[in-house]
Image: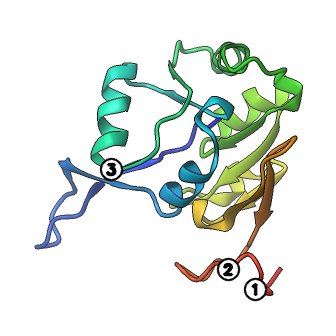
Amino acid sequence: MFGCRAVEAHPTEKGGLPDPSCLIAAPGADHLFGRIPRERWGVIADLDPAEVTKQFEAADLALPGVILRASGTIEHDYVSAAEQLGADPNFCLAVEDSPEGIDAALKIGMKVIAVAGGADPVGLSAADMVIPSLLSLHVVGLHPVLVLEVDALPEFGTFNPGQIKRR
C-alpha cells in the first residue's frame, strides 16, 4: 500500500511555484510501480479515484489495482485497501511519508517503510525502515511474495540488479 506522494507538480522554469497542471512522477515511482503487478498494490489518497487515475496517467505511472479515497481514519483505509487486494494486512507493506500514516499501519500489523523525501526524518522514526526516496526501493522478486532490495544511498538512475551497492 502506498500512502506516500507518488506524483509531484513540476517546478516552473523561472524558479516560481510548481505548476499543478504539469505533473511528474516522484523520483523512483515510475521504476517501482512499473515492476509490481497492479493486482498486488494499492494507493490511498485524499483525492477522488478518478483524479488519482488522471494524475498517474499524466505522470506516466502504472496504475494500481486499488485506488482508495482516504476516509479520515487511516487504519480503516489500510484494512479496506488490503481487503480489496485480497490480502491480510499483517502480510502487507505500507510505504508512507507521514507520522500518522506510519502509526496507523503499525497499529494494524503492517510493516512500514517511510519515505523521507523533504520531511523531517525524526517524525518518521517509528517506521521499520526510513529511506530517502522511492529510488531506494528495487523489486528483485515477485513470486510467491514481493521481494525488495533497499539501497540506502541510491545512485540516481544507475541501479543494476547484479551490481554491488553500498548498504
The dot on residue 163 is 1
State how far apart marks 3 and 1 are (Cα). Answer: 28 Å
Q: Earlier in the sequence, mark 2 or mark 3?
A: 3
The residue under the point 87% across, 41% down is: 144
Q: Position of residue 2 (x, y in %)?
A: 60, 38
What count of labels does the image hold? Answer: 3
Q: Position of residue 129 (x, y in %)?
A: 80, 55
Q: Which residue is mark 2?
A: 160
Label 3 Cα neighbours within 10 Å, binned few <14 / some 14-19 / many ≥20: many
42 or 163, nearer to the observer: 163
Q: Is 125 on the left or on the right of 155, as rendered?
A: right
Q: Is 31 on the left or on the right of 22, as rendered?
A: right
Q: Nearer the viewer, mark 2 or mark 3?
A: 2
Residue 77 sits in quarter: top right
Q: Regarding mark 2 in the picture, which secondary structure is present there? A: loop
Q: Which residue is mark 3?
A: 59
| Picture layout, residue 138 above or below residue 65 | below
For this orientation, the residue located farthest to the left is 14
Q: Is 111 on the left or on the right of 119, as rendered?
A: right
State how far apart marks 2 and 3 are (Cα). Answer: 24 Å
Query: Which amino acid does the dot numbered 3 rest on?
Result: Ala
Quadrant where the N terminus sits is top right
